[in-house]
Image: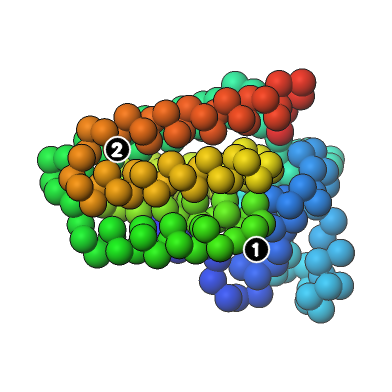
Amino acid sequence: MKNNQLFYNHSLSHKIAEKITNQIMAGELKPGEKIIESTYAEEFGTSRAPIRESLYLLENEGLIERIPRKGAVVKGYTEDEVYDLLEMRIVLESLAMKRIKVRGINEEILKKMEQLVQKMSEVDDEKQYANLNQEFHMLIIEMSKSEIIKEMYWRLGRPLLVLQRISFLEEEHIKKSLKEHRIILDLLKENLIDEALVLLENHNHSVIKRVENKTKNKQSY
């Protein structure tokens, strides 16, 4: 999966895909809910062809699935699938930090991370925060200089972003997350990779715990 597939371009089908993605992230479209093609065709003043192309993109991203005799619906994740996604994130990010320890800190990426942390401190919407949060973590992956790690991480894509948003529904969780990101950034600046790795793993386990608390009485998300 190429990097630009996660953040859609400006073609009509990609704009429609972005619209549906935002509705899923905002909880306006629920797991199992059918995607009504005519709704988007009317809103965007287009035929069904760009709608179907956008649904194909979202299916590849793991946000929707096609069910016989029902059509395209928002994909739901079982608790086991949720934990698998989040655990895979921990494994890949921890491995990335170990590669950074060997290959060294990239100062340009550090500057980007610093700018992101500043933006994260200025937003008050959990969806915006989740987007910036994912960008921050993707920069850790980028700094590893491993195309394999990067490719595997991108495969987590949008489903991971949706799950991360769940963990930021309360303001206190955003504040805690922001504080941890600042400390991780400071540790990387000081080249204290082992310490940053420990905090990053604890940070990611906190996300799992928060998502668990949100989904423990549900069969899927």
Q: Is residue 130 above or below residue 17?
A: above
Report the amino acid beneath label 2.
Ala
Q: Is residue 146 visible?
A: no
Residue 1 place in picture, x, y as percent: 43, 52
Q: Secondary structure at mark 1?
A: helix
Residue 200 place in picture, x, y as percent: 37, 35
Q: Say which of marks 2 and 1 sits in front.
A: 2
Classify mark 2: residues with Cα within 10 Å, few (<14), some (14-19) or many (20+): many
**Residue at numbered disc 2:** 196
What residue appears at the point 20 percent right and 47 percent down from the top-left corner?
190
Q: Is residue 186 visible?
A: yes
What residue appears at the point 66 percent right and 57 percent down from the top-left corner?
125
**Residue at numbered disc 1:** 18
Q: Is residue 47 above or below residue 53?
A: below
Q: Is residue 64 above or below residue 218?
A: below
Quadrant of the image for the C terminus? top right
Q: Nearer the viewer, residue 24 or 124?
A: 124
Q: Is residue 46 left or right of residue 82?
A: right
